[in-house]
Amino acid sequence: MDLKQLTYLLEIAKQLNFTKAAESLHLTQPTLSKMVKGLEEELGVTLFDRSGKFIKLTDAGTAAIQQIQLIVQSVQDLHTILNDVSNLRTGSIRIGLPPVIGTLFFPSVVANFQREYPHIDFHIVEEGAKKVESRILEGQLDLAVVVAPVESDDFEVMPYLNEELALILHESHILAEKASVDLLDLRKEAFILFPGGFAVRKHIMQACSKVGFEPRVIYESAHWDLLAEMVAANTGISILPQAICSKITNSSVKTVRLTNPTIPWNLIIIWHKDKYQSYAMREFIRFIQASQN
């Protein structure tokens, strides 16, 4: 029994006449009759009562036709759904974004993509880089934006944004008017930083260690705007991505370039190289690549 045979049965049930059904289906009447007889033998029931001048459905035939209608409709719905998915009229993408990155990534990329593909849904998970990397490997997320580098070879990696971390300090600070500041010049300062699980914090601590000191961290927050307000209150200094610094509107906060060494902050988009990529995800990746050109 196949789908074509089921549609033939529906046409016979509609016409209640083998000859008319055969004409509608562009088959010979004997061919159609033979097909029905074969299905009846396969199912072990009589579907049509042929004893009178006109055929009619048996009770088994009536029950069968009701189910066949559901089956045929489900197959048609399946084709419609798959067509919608392949033509990007529907779909979903699960993205992992560390909190710092979400501020930059969502408005400039996700929102623009949704304007072009309004029926593709995004499920955003905000967690630290290590957690979103694990979720991708476990199949719980489709892709993530993280700070390079990543340790696992299971990821496909696409560069997204290359920049540096910058120093922010109060306008009254002695270093506020400098064009650049060496990292070692900050060894006696009070630092206001992201918590330990953040990639930004990790890069800062490693850079400071390389030049010979460990920062004295007096305050931690997962929210960059709160860090900036603490700096505006002249309680300490902070180091943030340049893209975040550009969003600080408080005029009391000054941004100064860090040197000797510079601290790179390179964002990459990662996904599992061996897992299936949906139509929506493939188009989203293409969209990001196109936006960078």
Image (cartoon, rainbow, N blue to C red):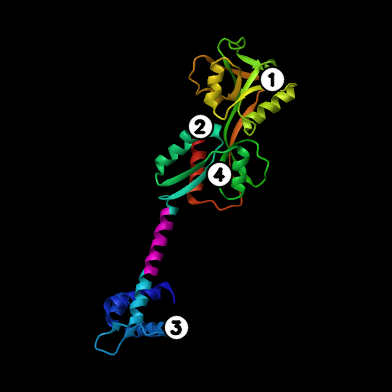
Label 3 Cα neighbours within 10 Å, binned few <14 / some 14-19 / many ≥20: few
Res 272 visible: no
- Identify the residue under disc 4: 143
- Identify the residue under disc 2: 103
- Identify the residue under disc 3: 42
- Identify the residue under disc 1: 260
The kind of secondary structure element at disc 1 is loop
Counting residues from the start of the chain, the first of labels 1 and 3 encountered is 3
Look at the picture and state if 200 lies above or below 170: below
Please, what is the three-letter code of the amino acid marked with disc 2?
Answer: Thr
In the rendering, at what x and y percent does residue 220 appear? 60, 26
**Mark 1 or mark 3: which is in front?**
3
- Asked if the residue at tag 2 contacts the one at tag 1, i.e. Cβ–Cβ closer than 8 Å, the answer is no
**Mark 1 or mark 2: which is in front?**
2
C-alpha distance separating marks 1 and 2 = 28 Å
* Magenta-drawn segment: 70-84
C-alpha distance separating marks 2 and 4 = 17 Å
Instruction: Kindly identify the residue that appears in the image at 59 percent across and 46 percent down.
Output: 135
- Asked if the residue at tag 3 contacts the one at tag 1, i.e. Cβ–Cβ closer than 8 Å, the answer is no
User: Is 109 in front, or is 24?
Assistant: 109
User: Is 36 in front, or is 131?
Assistant: 131
Label 2 Cα neighbours within 10 Å, binned few <14 / some 14-19 / many ≥20: some
Please, what is the three-letter code of the amino acid marked with disc 4?
Answer: Leu
Counting residues from the start of the chain, the first of labels 2 and 4 encountered is 2
Please, what is the three-letter code of the amino acid marked with disc 1?
Answer: Asn
> Is 74 one of the magenta-colored residues?
yes
Counting residues from the start of the chain, the first of labels 1 and 4 encountered is 4
> Is 173 one of the magenta-colored residues?
no
Counting residues from the start of the chain, the first of labels 1 and 2 encountered is 2
C-alpha distance separating marks 1 and 4 = 34 Å
Left or right relative to 198: residue 290: left
Counting residues from the start of the chain, the first of labels 2 and 3 encountered is 3
